[in-house]
Image (cartoon, coloured by chain):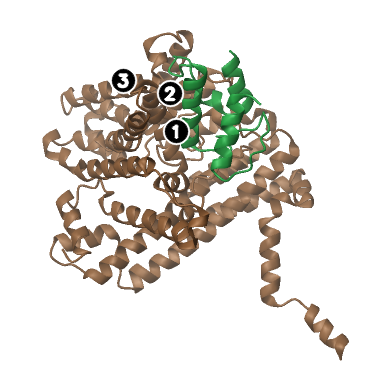
């Protein structure tokens, strides 16, 4: 299990949610996670993967699914 | 005997029948037969007709808007392949007919009319509205053409600065001239749709491909609402698109359910306001504050009742308003989240904001929180979150209301009217502080702490915070900050 996937699962568990997650499932636009969780994930992306999300073409919707996140990490 | 008793026991009571009916209604969007029927042409027509009746019953939609909604939904049902074009067309028509989001700008336009006597009165506002759509198109096309330009890299900041430039031009234009009048009208039209334009500009970076002309036509979707973009942009909507006939039918049924719920809530609201305000001893909170300031206080007991009542009625008002718009969006085939979802269940201030006014919270988070969070105080997590929260709930929240109300500067000296925003500054500052403290608090109650500590106490805190904060939620200019503070103190014997 990748670190980013584990981070998302940890956040879901912390919020008392179902930890099972489909890679293509919308996390934020579906309401499953909120903006506070988005901040936690951003911090993981910066701290553990060295991704600078302040780059000019960053779009918050790129964090919406596990596939999006893993694509961002592997880019 | 036993068989007779058995028959009686098996016969449903009126209450049981009602409960069964309620269950069937609430499950209608999961009922295969209902979904299959809704997917048929006749079923679609029935659901749209029922939806329009519910929308009319909610009392939140004017007759012309209801007619436009009916025509648009019918057109989408008849020619589904042209859905986006139909919605864009309906939205352009709606925008040209009603370019302002609040009546203050319309009142100002009427006041400025004498300066435009050389022009046909009926054509001025539509012409300015169309001009704004052309400007929106030019802005979006430029950002798409030059994505590395400063404006495209910081679209929200660029649009806000550009709008303030327009405001400055309007304020400096000689009063009584056509230029002065036209600039003020354009300022009002543009602030009514600035946040839609901001979302459209951000959307250019997203995955959803959409012609610029379509994005530019989405400056006031036909489903109306305030300057807060419910549905955000085509990029956001596309994530909730029904992918097949069954999903579309389900989404329409969800829209119908929400519209019916809005109509029921609207009826309850009307009954509550009639009983409490017209037949009963209570008055709206704003009136109670002014009465206290004028030394005509209604008394501590009634004032407490007014503050608490205002909180609950406000929740219902926001819910009805949001449900009507979200229901209409769903009828168009986008299953977007609700604007209000059980706010009384909130156990933190942030959760309340999320449940009470989702799309306004999203606007502040998308356009103010994230940009600030991604750029400033990266080495200090707590400070970084606090600053971003202040940028959203404090600065962004204030800017939204201040920019929306700037028509007051058209006919008065800026120093004479700037004071009307004092309560708004206090309101947004306290809200931001409350959210920051709420996020900084280390340990939050857990279920094992007991029912009261986990379920009751946090909810009471949230309710109390917003009850008292609402006293300062005013930009009418009536009732100063000190008068509102005095009213609050009087609740505690001060």
Q: Could you tell me how far apart the alpha carbons at marks 2 and 3 are, in whole angstroms?
A: 15 Å
Q: Nearer the viewer, residue A3 or B229?
A: A3
Q: Could you tell me how far apart the alpha carbons at marks 2 and 1 are, in whole angstroms?
A: 9 Å
Question: If you read the primary sequence from the N terminus, does the residue marked by circle 3 or circle 1 appear first?
Answer: 1
Q: Nearer the viewer, residue B120 or B427?
A: B427
* Image quadrant assignment for residue B362: top left
Residue at image coords 50%, 25%: A44
Are the numbered discs 2 and 3 placed on the same chain, yes or no? Answer: yes
Q: Is residue B390 above or below residue B357?
A: above
Front: mark 3 or 1: 3
Residue B423 picture location, percent across and down: 22, 46
Q: Colour of chain B?
A: brown
Residue indicated by mark 1: B95
Chain given the colour green: A
Do the residues under discs 3 and 1 have CB atoms within 8 angstroms? no
Residue at image coords 38%, 53%: B462
Q: Could you tell me how far apart the alpha carbons at marks 3 and 1 are, in whole angstroms?
A: 21 Å
Question: If you read the primary sequence from the N terminus, does the residue marked by circle 2 or circle 1 appear first?
Answer: 1
Residue indicated by mark 2: B133
Check disc 3: other Cα within 10 Å, few if <14, some if 14-19, many if 20+: few
The chain under label 3 reads B
Residue at image coords 37%, 11%: B150
Check disc 2: other Cα within 10 Å, few if <14, some if 14-19, many if 20+: many
| Mark carried by residue B327 | none
Element type where label 2 sits in the image: helix
| Mark carried by residue B162 | 3
The chain under label 2 reads B
Do the residues under discs 2 and 1 have CB atoms within 8 angstroms? yes
């Amino acid at each position: 299990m990748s670190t980013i996937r584990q981070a998302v699962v940890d956040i879901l568990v912390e919020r008392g949610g179902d930890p099972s997650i489909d890679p293509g499932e919308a996390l934020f636009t579906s309401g499953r996670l909120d903006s506070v969780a988005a901040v936690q994930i951003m911090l993981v992306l910066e701290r553990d993967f060295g991704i600078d999300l302040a780059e000019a073409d960053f779009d918050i919707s790129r964090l919406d699914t596990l596939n999006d996140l893993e694509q961002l990490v592997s880019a | 005997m036993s068989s007779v008793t058995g028959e009686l026991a098996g016969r449903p009571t009126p209450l049981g029948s009602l409960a069964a009916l309620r269950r069937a209604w609430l499950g209608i969007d999961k009922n295969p037969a209902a979904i299959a029927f809704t997917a048929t042409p006749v079923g679609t027509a029935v659901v749209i007709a029922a939806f329009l009746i519910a929308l009319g019953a909610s009392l939140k939609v004017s007759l012309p808007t209801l007619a436009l909604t009916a025509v648009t939904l019918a057109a989408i049902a008849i020619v589904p392949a042209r859905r986006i074009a139909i919605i864009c067309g309906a939205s352009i028509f709606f925008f040209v007919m009603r370019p302002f989001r609040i009546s203050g700008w319309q009142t100002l336009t009427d006041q400025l009319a004498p300066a435009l006597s050389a022009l046909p009165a009926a054509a001025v506002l539509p012409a300015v509205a169309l001009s704004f759509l052309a400007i929106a198109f030019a802005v979006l096309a430029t950002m798409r053409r030059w994505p590395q330009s400063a404006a495209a890299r910081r679209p929200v900041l660029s649009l806000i600065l550009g709008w303030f430039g327009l405001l400055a031009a309007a304020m400096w234009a000689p009063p009584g001239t056509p230029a002065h009048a036209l600039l003020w009208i354009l300022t009002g039209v543009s602030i009514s749709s600035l946040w839609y334009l901001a979302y459209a500009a951000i959307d250019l970076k997203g995955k959803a491909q959409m012609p610029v002309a379509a994005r530019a036509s989405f400056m006031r979707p036909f489903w109306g609402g305030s300057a807060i973009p419910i549905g955000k942009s085509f990029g956001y909507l596309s994530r909730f698109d029904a992918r097949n006939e069954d999903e579309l039918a389900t989404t329409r049924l969800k829209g119908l359910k929400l519209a019916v719920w809005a109509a029921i809530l609207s009826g309850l609201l009307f009954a509550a306001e009639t009983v409490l305000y017209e037949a009963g001893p209570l008055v709206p909170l704003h009136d109670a504050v002014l009465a206290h300031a004028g030394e005509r206080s209604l008394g501590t007991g009634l004032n407490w009742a007014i503050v608490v009542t205002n909180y609950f009625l406000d929740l219902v008002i926001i819910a009805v308003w949001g449900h009507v718009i979200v229901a209409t969006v769903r009828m168009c085939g986008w299953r977007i989240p609700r604007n209000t979802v059980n706010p009384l269940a909130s156990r933190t201030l942030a959760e309340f904001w999320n449940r009470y006014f989702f799309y306004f919270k999203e606007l502040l988070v998308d356009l103010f929180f994230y940009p600030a969070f991604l750029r400033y105080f990266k080495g200090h997590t707590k400070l970084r979150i606090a600053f971003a929260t202040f940028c959203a709930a404090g600065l962004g929240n204030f800017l939204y209301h201040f920019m929306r109300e700037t028509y007051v500067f058209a006919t008065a000296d800026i120093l004479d009217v700037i004071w009307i925003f004092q309560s708004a500054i206090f309101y947004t500052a306290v809200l931001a502080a409350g959210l920051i403290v709420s996020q900084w608090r280390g340990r939050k109650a857990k279920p094992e702490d007991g029912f009261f500590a986990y379920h009751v106490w946090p909810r009471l805190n949230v309710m109390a915070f917003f009850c008292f904060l609402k006293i300062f939620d005013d930009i009418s200019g009536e009732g100063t900050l000190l008068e509102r503070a005095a009213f609050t103190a009087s609740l505690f014997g001060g």
